[in-house]
Image: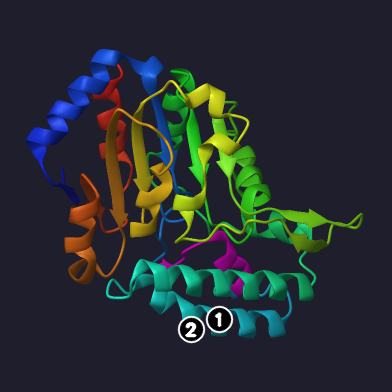
Amino acid sequence: MKNVIIVNSKELKSTKEKIAEEGKGKIHVITDFDRTLTKAFVNSKRVPSLISVLRDEGYLTVDYSDKAKALYEKYHKIELDPKIPISEKKKKMQEWWEKHFDLLIESNLNKRDLEKVVNSGNIRLRRGTLKFLDFLHKHKIPLVIISSSGLGVESISLYLENKKRLYDNIHIISNSFEWDEDGYAIRVKKPIIHSMNKDETTLKEHPFYDKIKDRKNVLLLGDSLGDLKMIKGFSYKNLIKIGFLNEKIKESLTEYKRGYDIVILNDAGMDYVNKLLREIVK
């Protein structure tokens, strides 16, 4: 299939057979949201996240937009640089997110702003994502979304609700705000989740854990090397890791092939993922 790289076809075939043999009742899926379930580019314009729409479309103050872009320019290149150690990236991503959340609160982020972002049309699901969500719901397979989104649980829930896909098998782990009675953000809840500390997000701490603890066969979807850590702390039996490499392909492909079992290039759709699920769930 075009834009799909299978790192070790023999090993993948063996893992698929093991998962299929145990049945759909032993499967759950862990995924990132921004640039994994959603497209990285819309109309040839890079749209990396929900927060970028808020930043770039001027929904808050001009002062916010300029300051947020300055933070992005400073920290995003650190996030993408494969030569910088993960330990250093963690420190810098924590620093970035703390500064950005303070800026959002200072700029009077309101729940109404989340609705504007979600309804802007700038965030689009990958081709085939609705089928992906429907398939998992139909077969009662839990989907755990672990996202470092700067607009967090509220915006992801609202987006899926608007798509009529906020199913009861979906569980969202992300940043979340506390709001005052007028709908303004007054603080962000701790701990802060960013792209490099998903390995510190322990699934056992969340109320849905009982629904997945015996489902030891896992499909993991992400678009960054940090997303590989989403599985940490979960005792799995069989794991298939699918990575979306949306840009800087030449520079990053070697690292992605080292981490992921399957690499999907060029902001392609979910066709291969849906095909894989159909092969496993019979």
* Residue at the limit of the structure toward the right, as seen here: 181
Residue 51 lies in the magenta stretch: yes
Q: Compared to 241, does 257 lie above or below?
A: below
Up the image or down, 247 lies above or below 39; here it is below
x, y percentage for residue 242?
Answer: 29, 44
Q: Could you say where residue 120 lies in the image, as x and y percent from the top left? A: 61, 59
Residue at 21%, 21% (x, y): give it: 18
Labelled pair 1, 2 in contact (Cβ < 8 Å): yes
| Relative horizontal placement of residue 280, taking residue 162 as reference (left or right) | left
Figure coloring: rainbow
Q: Is 265 on the left or on the right of 204, as rendered?
A: left
Report the front residue among 164 and 182. Answer: 182
Does 153 sit left or right of 226 as displayed?
Answer: right
Provide the residue span drawn in magenta.
Answer: 45-55
Type of amino acid under label 1: Leu
> Does residue 151 belong to the magenta stretch?
no
Q: Secondary structure at mark 1?
A: helix
Q: Which mark is residue 74?
A: 2
- SS type, badge 2: helix
Query: Residue 246 lies in what quarter of the image?
Result: bottom left
Task: Tell me which amino acid carries mark 2.
Answer: Lys
* Image position, residue 251 (x, y; %): 21, 71
Which residue is drawn at the image coordinates 46% and 64% (left, top)? 48
Task: Tell me which residue sits at (30%, 27%) in the image.
Answer: 237
Q: Which corner quadrant holds the N terminus?
A: top left
Q: Which mark is residue 71?
A: 1
Q: On the picture, is 60 further left or further right than 40? A: right
* Label at residue 109: none
